[in-house]
Image: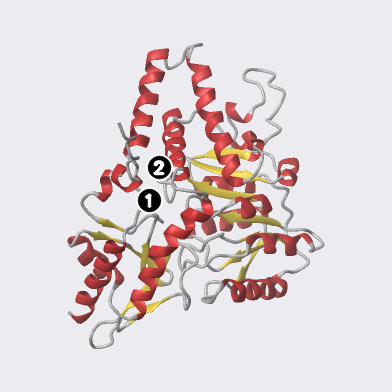
Amino acid sequence: MPAELPIPLRDLMPALANKAYFNYGGQGPLPGPSLAAISEAFATIQELGPFSDNVWPYVNRTVSGLRQRLGSWFGVDAARVAFTENVTSGCVLPLWGLPWQAGDELLVSDAEHYGVVAALEELARRHQLRITSLAVADLDGDAAATAAAVGRRLEAALTPRTRLLVLSDLLWNSGQTMPIAAVAAQLANHPRHPWLLVDAAQSLGSLPVAEAAGAADIYACTGHKWCCGPEGLGAVTVSERLLELSSPTVIGWRSLEHDGPGSGGYHRDARRFEVATSCTPLFAGLNQSLQLLEAEGDAEARLAAIRERSVQLWEGLQRLDGVRTLLEVPPPAGLVSFTMAGPSGETMDPAVVVKQLGEQGTWLRTLESPRCLRACTHLVSTADEVERLLAQLVQLSVG
């Protein structure tokens, strides 16, 4: 008998059966096998006893297996990987433990997510730090031009008091990528060697991440976006020099090298930034989602599939009257942000456009800064879906 063909990943995602979905940058749909892995993990834990001697080997295998897999994706030793609930926690937990001094400057790009910015503002308030800005949101050209501009602007923005740079790997608003490895090398030549914090919310499962993750001091990701894993589980990689100097600020039993009184202090590796009980079945679910993505090819192949659809969408948008994409060149990844004008030239309200598209079974989202629409294509997106979205935008633009 002929061997059974594997089921396409798209067909394993029930959420895609009745809609055209372009919100992978917000949350990816959970594949059926990942949901099954979560359910099976819950059942196994109950069968073994949720708090028994028999359950701990299973829990430890599940957690350590995912840690090893993510270490491979990040290109770092698994000892540099800590689990968190989300990207913001991954950014904040190591950041708050660093030895800040009044007057230190935090250089923050103008394209960072407001959740991380709010945490930085509170950090600055408590430690009498100063926040300065690095302009990158306007960079809409190709990779070489973008990298050159970032390098020039960074050099001009650095001061003797700069202690931290915050810069996303893939900008969540414009869809532009940043030259993280080159930035890290530039920071290494600064007299104070500022820390490099990378919000990689849009990176894991979207881009090859090993180069950037290996270069950053804090590289924080989530599993529920491009990885199509369950919400509530993220990971952060930390550098060796950060491990030497940063102490936990939110502390629990998982932070400690040994459980119980006289524990002997914190873990020497990234586990010091883990706090307490996590939902083990989520680890099983994310591990399954990552395995499904690996089956689609390596990181470069997956990015090529993502870009095939995002470039199709970007090129189609160039042909539509009244539409302006934020990037002047085809997108380097899967984020496509744009604005629309109506037949009289007036700017259309993105929230209204999203609502009208949703009524037709097509889902994308609005962004507030800049005020625009954002569509995300994944490797499971189809050419027909993209053409359907373009046709719907034409209909909306003519009224």
Point 40% across, 25% down: residue: 41
Q: Rounded to the nearest whole Å, what is the CA distance between mark 1 and mark 2?
A: 8 Å
* Tag 2: amino acid: Glu
Point 25% across, 82% down: residue: 342
Looking at this view, is 283 or 379 the one in front?
Answer: 379
Q: Is residue 122 visible?
A: yes
| Quadrant of res 286 | top left
Residue 154: mark in rendering: none
Quarter of the rendering occupied by the N terminus: top left
Q: Is residue 276 visible?
A: no
| Quadrant of res 365 | bottom left
Q: Position of residue 285 (x, y in %)?
A: 41, 35
Q: Position of residue 347 (x, y in %)?
A: 30, 81
Can you say whether 84 is above or below 324 in the image? above
Point 74% across, 64% down: residue: 186
Q: Residue under label 1, please give it.
A: 27
- Extreme right residue here? 191
- Asked if residue 54 lies left or right of residue 368, the reply is right
- Extreme front residue here? 1
Q: Residue under label 2, please give it.
A: 231
- Extreme bottom residue here? 344
Q: Residues within 10 Å of mark 1 (few under 14, many from 20)?
A: some
Query: Please, what secondary structure does the residue beneath circle 1 have?
Result: loop
Can you say whether 200 is above or below 49 in the image? below
The answer to whether the residues at label 1 and label 2 have Cβ atoms under 8 Å apart is yes
Q: Position of residue 214 (x, y in %)?
A: 66, 50
* Tag 1: amino acid: Gln
